[in-house]
Image (cartoon, rainbow, N blue to C red):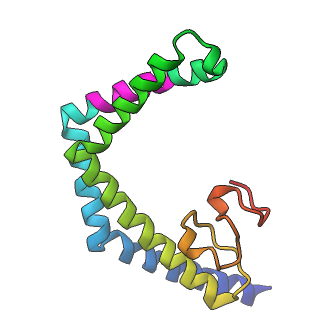
Amino acid sequence: MRIATLERIEILDKAEVLAKMIVESDVADEYRRAFWRLKQDRRAQQLIARFVKLKERYEEVQRFGKYHPDYRDVMKEVREAKRELDLHETVAAFKEAEKAMQELLDEISVLIGKAVSEHVKVPTGNPYFLSVGCSGGCGAGGSCGCRT
């Protein structure tokens, strides 16, 4: 039992080293810079706040569906706000940096999972990695039975 504990500690130590490498990577640096720029961009923050507020209205309208009197107006407003948000330069740059960070983490998860076994379920929502144990991706509530 003591050997298993020492082995576990060694594995966790190596995981901390890997985490430090990820944190110090160019991908993580760009993610942090993009996040900081997003938080400092007043217009982006206004667009995000507007979208969040509209999303609340959208969820209220969705309870009644197309029978809600404001259904069409709310749906149009949400689509327009989402488009404006997605096209904002700072938001788009953050989403790109976030995607790159997520891809790195997914790749690392898959490499670790495959090193253990081809049948290990790797939590990733990226369809590119679906061949590793979990159809639909764990994040997508796939048929693997894992919890999201």
Relative height, residue 11 to residue 43 (above, below): below
So how many labels did they put on this image? 0
Q: Where is residue 38 in the image (x, y as percent from the top left)?
A: 25, 44
Residue at x 57%, y 79% (from the top left corner) = 110
Quadrant of residue 139 within the rendered picture: bottom right
Farthest residue toward the top? 69
In the rendered image, residue 113 lying in the magenta stretch gets the answer no
Q: In this view, does 140 lie to the left or right of 90?
A: right
| Quadrant in which the C terminus appears | bottom right
Give the overall secondary structure of the magenta segment. Answer: helix
Q: Position of residue 50 (x, y in %)?
A: 35, 24
Residue at x 49%, y 19% (from the top left corner) = 72
Q: Position of residue 106 (x, y in %)?
A: 50, 72
Q: Nearer the viewer, residue 67 or 39?
A: 67
Relative height, residue 4 to residue 60 (above, below): below
Q: Nearer the viewer, residue 5 or 73?
A: 73
Quadrant of residue 144 within the rendered picture: bottom right
Q: Is residue 45 left or right of residue 121?
A: left
| Quadrant in which the N terminus appears | bottom right
Q: Which of 92 and 9 is in front in this view?
A: 92
The residue stretch that appears in magenta:
46-56
Residue at x 65%, y 79% (from the top left corner) = 132
Relative height, residue 69 to residue 90 (above, below): above
Q: Is residue 98 left or right of residue 30?
A: right
Residue at x 58%, y 83% (from the top left corner) = 112
